[in-house]
């Protein structure tokens, strides 16, 4: 096992981690605003992967354009999800449990609609690049990985700037703290929630296309969302920087485990490691403890 | 309707009832309940196939194994926010599946474990279901069940009344996991064949969906909805994807328009009380002026 092999695997892992980070951030965003775990995120990923596939394969667009369209479509489906799944619950101020069930039902619904439309066969994205591999000395980097890593980092930086520095970000953070108070301050919390769903859906869309071009597309591609969940559990639920760090940590551990122990048993080991991590540091990396609302 | 549909329905009823104390009463979500079913089924099946143990030993080992596993999983997660628990229970399902797939020389891997002896027939499953439902009904009306409801409604208030939240959650979790394990044991000895894909998170979450369809705090509702939603599509012979879509649409409609579920918090005993009150002679109202 040479140095170049390790570097290759590391880059592969980090690029995977970047996609996990997109998933985890989309999930954490909804969590921080509405305080529930959005299990429908996987469904959004599956749907937008298929939309990306349509743009790339049928219309012959490049990676960037099809990702862009998939992201917009994902955002719109995110708003749709909010409308069918959560709008009524919010209006009625239902307990969080119902959000939970609603989200998981919507997730299953999305995936099964896709199964009816496309079957359980696998579809694969076209090759986007002339040179699938870049050589740097003895290190061979997959072009797709490098591009994915670059796009993800740019997206994450932009997102962090939006959340931290803009008026919209301020509104989102305010609603996350307390939506009633936010609406007293003149923030339309309903619109803010919609926008949050749009952003999260867009992130899911990008993640969907990237996952699709790394693996194959099938209606259950969205189950990869589990990685995003683990990342945000490690990072501390609802914390965006925590989720990003957690995602990279997870992907590197995963690549290491795949080399050491093999693919099949890796999820079990990661589960045990996460349990151990929660035992030592229950609030995740971010350490911010979100109190259960009484 | 053939026998296996009835048995499958009964086992689903046990599964849904196993979620009832956890989700319906305590407000904890488990998307890994089917994983316990898998653990119970595999422990019992392996003991029977490879070690020729008698039924009672296999069954006990399966159920107790689930109890031990749930303690290990519950200890770090039940102290945290409920979301951590729900997410970790989801990963538990994945992890169990990975272990079952990886240890192919014992569990048969993806091919599954076959030639398990057929030790349980329809009567056995019926008796098992009745016992489980009775046990859970008893638990709902016990002091312990009331404590669970208090935790679901307001954890802080429950704590201030001297209820140990963590200990109660832990007990409920171990109890329900053992019931799920019992369902697994019955399943293994009736169907005689198990493979890891039967127990994925879709099975677990469909149980949660059934529970919500029937009414979260109504045991009668959960049993009824499990029976109806499992049997109806079998009889109508829908494709399984279409069936799931129909479930989901129904659930979303229920959540949007009747969030307390079909029966809300009504139980079958309430029906008896209602009939009794109708049959009994109307009492004279006490005179207000007096």
Image: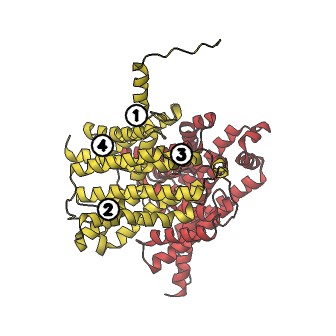
| Marks 3 and 2, how far apart at CA | 31 Å
Which residue position holds label 1?
B268
* For the residues bearing labels 4 and 2, Cβ distance under 8 angstroms: no
Colour of chain A, in one word, is: red
* For the residues bearing labels 3 and 2, Cβ distance under 8 angstroms: no
| Marks 4 and 2, how far apart at CA | 27 Å
Q: Residues within 10 Å of mark 3 (few under 14, many from 20)?
A: some
In the rendered structure, the residue with mark 4 lies on which chain? B
Instruction: Using the image, determine if residue A210 lies above or below residue A258.
Output: above
In the rendered structure, the residue with mark 1 lies on which chain? B
- Identify the coloring: by chain
Which residue position holds label 4?
B239
Which residue position holds label 3?
B146
Which of the chains is yellow? B
| Residue nearer the viewer, A181 or B33 | B33
- Image position, residue A120 (x, y; %): 35, 52
């Amino acid at each position: 096992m040479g140095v170049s092999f390790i570097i290759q695997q590391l880059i592969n892992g980090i690029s995977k981690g970047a996609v996990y980070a997109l998933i985890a951030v989309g999930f954490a965003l909804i969590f921080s605003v509405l305080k529930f775990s959005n299990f429908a995120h996987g469904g959004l990923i599956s749907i937008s992967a298929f939309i990306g596939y349509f743009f790339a394969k049928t219309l012959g667009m490049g990676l960037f354009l099809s990702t862009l369209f998939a992201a917009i479509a994902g955002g719109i489906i995110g708003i749709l999800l909010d409308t069918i799944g959560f709008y009524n619950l919010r209006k009625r101020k239902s307990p969080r449990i119902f959000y939970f069930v609603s989200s998981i039902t919507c997730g299953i619904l999305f995936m099964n609609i896709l199964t009816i439309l496309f079957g359980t066969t696998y579809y694969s994205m076209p090759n986007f690049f002339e040179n699938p591999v870049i050589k740097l000395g003895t290190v061979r980097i997959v072009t797709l990985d490098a591009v994915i890593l670059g796009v993800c980092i740019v997206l994450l930086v932009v997102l962090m700037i939006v959340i931290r520095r803009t008026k919209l970000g301020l509104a989102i953070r305010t609603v996350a703290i307390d939506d009633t108070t936010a609406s007293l301050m003149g923030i339309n919390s309903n619109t803010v929630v919609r926008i949050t769903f749009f952003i999260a859906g867009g992130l899911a869309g990008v993640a969907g296309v990237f996952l699709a071009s790394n693996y194959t597309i099938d209606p259950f591609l969205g189950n990869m969302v589990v990685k995003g969940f683990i990342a945000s559990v490690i990072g501390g639920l609802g914390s965006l920087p925590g989720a990003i760090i957690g995602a990279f940590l997870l992907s590197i551990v995963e690549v290491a485990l795949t080399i050491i122990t093999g693919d099949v048993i890796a999820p079990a080991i990661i589960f045990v490691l996460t349990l151990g991590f929660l035992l030592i540091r229950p609030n995740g990396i971010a350490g911010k403890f979100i109190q259960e609302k009484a | 309707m053939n026998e296996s549909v009835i048995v499958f329905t009964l086992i689903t009823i046990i599964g849904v009832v196993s979620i009832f104390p956890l989700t319906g009463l305590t407000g904890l979500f488990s998307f890994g309940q089917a994983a316990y079913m898998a653990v119970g089924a595999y422990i019992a099946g392996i003991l029977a196939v490879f070690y020729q143990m008698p039924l009672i030993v296999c069954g006990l080992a399966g159920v107790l194994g689930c109890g031990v596993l749930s303690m290990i999983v519950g200890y770090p997660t039940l102290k945290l926010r409920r979301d951590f628990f729900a997410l970790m229970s989801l990963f538990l399902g994945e992890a169990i599946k990975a272990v079952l797939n990886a240890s192919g020389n014992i569990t048969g891997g993806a091919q599954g474990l076959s030639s398990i002896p057929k030790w349980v027939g329809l009567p056995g499953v019926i008796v098992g279901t009745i016992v489980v439902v009775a046990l859970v009904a008893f638990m709902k009306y016990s002091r312990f069940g009331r404590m669970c409801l208090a935790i679901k409604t307001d954890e802080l208030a429950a704590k201030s009344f001297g209820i140990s939240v963590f200990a109660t959650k832990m007990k409920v979790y171990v109890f329900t996991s053992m019931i799920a394990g019992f369902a697994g044991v019955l399943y293994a000895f009736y169907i005689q064949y198990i493979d890891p894909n039967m127990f994925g998170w879709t099975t677990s979450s469909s149980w949660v969906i059934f529970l919500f369809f029937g009414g979260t705090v109504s045991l009668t509702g959960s049993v009824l909805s499990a029976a109806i939603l499992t049997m109806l599509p079998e009889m109508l012979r829908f494709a399984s994807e279409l069936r799931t879509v129909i479930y989901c649409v129904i659930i979303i409609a229920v959540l949007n328009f009747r969030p307390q579920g079909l029966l809300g918090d009504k139980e079958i005993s309430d029906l008896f009380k209602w009939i009794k009150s109708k049959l009994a002679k109307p009492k004279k109202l006490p005179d207000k002026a007096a």
